[in-house]
Image (cartoon, grey):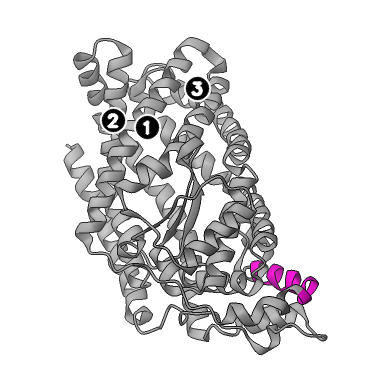
Amino acid sequence: MNTPGRGLAVLRILLLVLLLSCMAGHAAWAGTIVRDLPPGLQIPAAAQPGPGFDADQATAAYLAQLSPEQRKLSDQYFEGGYWVQLWELLWTVGACVLLLLSGISRRMSEWSQRIGRRRWIGTPIYIAQFLIALFVLELPLSIYTDYLREQQYRLTEQAFGGWMRDQLVALGVNTVFGAVVLTAIYAAIRRSGARWWVWATGLTYVFLMIFLLIGPVYVEPLFNAYKPLPEGPTREAVLSLARANQVPTDHVEWFDASKQTTRLSANVAGFLGTTRIALNDNLLNKSSLPEIKAVLGHEMGHFVLNHTVKEPILLCLTVGLAFALLHLCMDRALGRWGGRLKLGDRADPAALPLAFALVSVIFFLLTPVQNSIIRSYEAEADAFGLNAAREPHGWAMAALRLSTYRKMEPGPVEEFVFYDHPSGYHRIHAAMVWLKENQAMVRASEAAQNEQAPGTAP
């Protein structure tokens, strides 16, 4: 007789084979390549402003700063991510099917109903159990995709214990927040009948806005230590840029992301009196002041252009489409398999694994739509940042540094389907076009900018 324990064991053995095969294919040579470019601003001769300046040649000169080995490793990492997305989908669907076929989901639901006889108590208890069970089932794959693979490509130096601690903290946050959101959606399902997906879309937008507003201020400090950026040229330049673009804060912080990743990042987030500007220590330590200003100009663009409010609206239209498709698929699936799996109607929390599997497939198919929405807002912030910071070389250099984990020159179809940001090539080219149209302005300040020392974290 097949038991849930045996099913879980088979699942782990299959993934172990996958991990070993992937590690054998990548680990042999990834560690021998220098991933990061040297600190500081490096302007190619062909990108210097002048009468014969050509944006295409300047872009090619910037891209030529990457060695063939660096480009190959960058392409390999990013293209491998396409398969990772597919594996994650298949693994999630498989985990949900296992919870249904093994009867674990039904038993969790029955236990939750005994503990909390009222639905508003029993439902979140079941949802919390489901999210924890899904985390456990997906953990082997997560260890490979989010830890081993990052180690292989030298994108993290974090010890496994620290990584696991972050995963458990994220599990706690996701369980609490997910239980609240999904309980509200189940209440909408019970009360609104066939129109549940309309109410569920509205609730998703509300909760998404809440999380976007409070997350950077109250959730992110659970993973990293945030400290005030010390007085100095970097802080003054950031605050000057904020004042010039009406970002209402003098709260500038840095955080210790280097313990988890080698990637550069920054953000401008918050609301009312909590608005803050945050830079990670990788950005401070690896890049020059023009790069820092260019990156912060982009992030301030998101804030000034109200992308925090606008972007979720379009994304939630996609969510609405996904929920509408789920409504159609869920009713048919329950009609075909509900009796065999001892599931009730769509309002039965025990059917959540079925709904989760279906919506995962739907969102996977809608990936190009979601990426296009996000990419359009990123392009707007890119343009804002170039005009605000006036650091085309800084922006080009920052885009070049992202090559450690982003393929620089994708094909048009590839970029449309898989990129949620403009490609490195398009970002550098946009910076060089801006430079061509503003050469006099750049020449007037270029000498002084080149003398600026790279920012350093305290």
Kindly report the distance in space between the C-alpha atoms of the residues bearing marks 2 and 3: 24 Å
Let me know if residue 175 is in the magenta part. Answer: no
- Left or right of 175? Residue 2 is left
Residue 426 spot, x, y in % from top left = 67, 67
- Residue at 26% across / 37% down in the picture? 132
- Residue at 65% across / 45% down in the picture? 305
Residue 289 spot, x, y in % from top left = 52, 71
Q: Mark 3 against mark 1, which lies toward the viewer?
A: 1
Instruction: Using the rendered image of the protein, determine whether residue 371 is visible from the camera's viewpoint.
Output: no
* Amino acid type at mark 1: Gly
Q: In the displayed structure, would residue 158 be above or below residue 173?
A: below
Quarter-of-image position of residue 429: bottom right
First in residue order: circle 2 vs circle 3: 2
- Residue at 56% across / 84% down in the picture? 65
Mark 2 highlights which residue? 128
Mark 1 highlights which residue? 178
Majority SS type along the magenta span:
helix
Quadrant the C terminus occupies: bottom left
Instruction: Using the rendered image of the protein, determine whether residue 380 is visible from the camera's viewpoint.
Output: yes
For label 2, the crowd category at 10 Å Cα-Cα, with few meaning under 14, some 14 to 19 and many 20 or more, is many
- Depth order, front residue of 8/169: 169
At numbered mark 2, what does the secondary structure look like: helix, strand or loop? helix
What range of the chain is rendered magenta? 427-440
Quadrant the N terminus occupies: top left
Labels 2 and 1 touching (C-beta < 8 A): yes
For label 1, the crowd category at 10 Å Cα-Cα, with few meaning under 14, some 14 to 19 and many 20 or more, is some
Residue 389 spot, x, y in % from top left = 63, 63
Let me know if residue 431 is in the magenta part. Answer: yes
Labels 3 and 1 touching (C-beta < 8 A): no
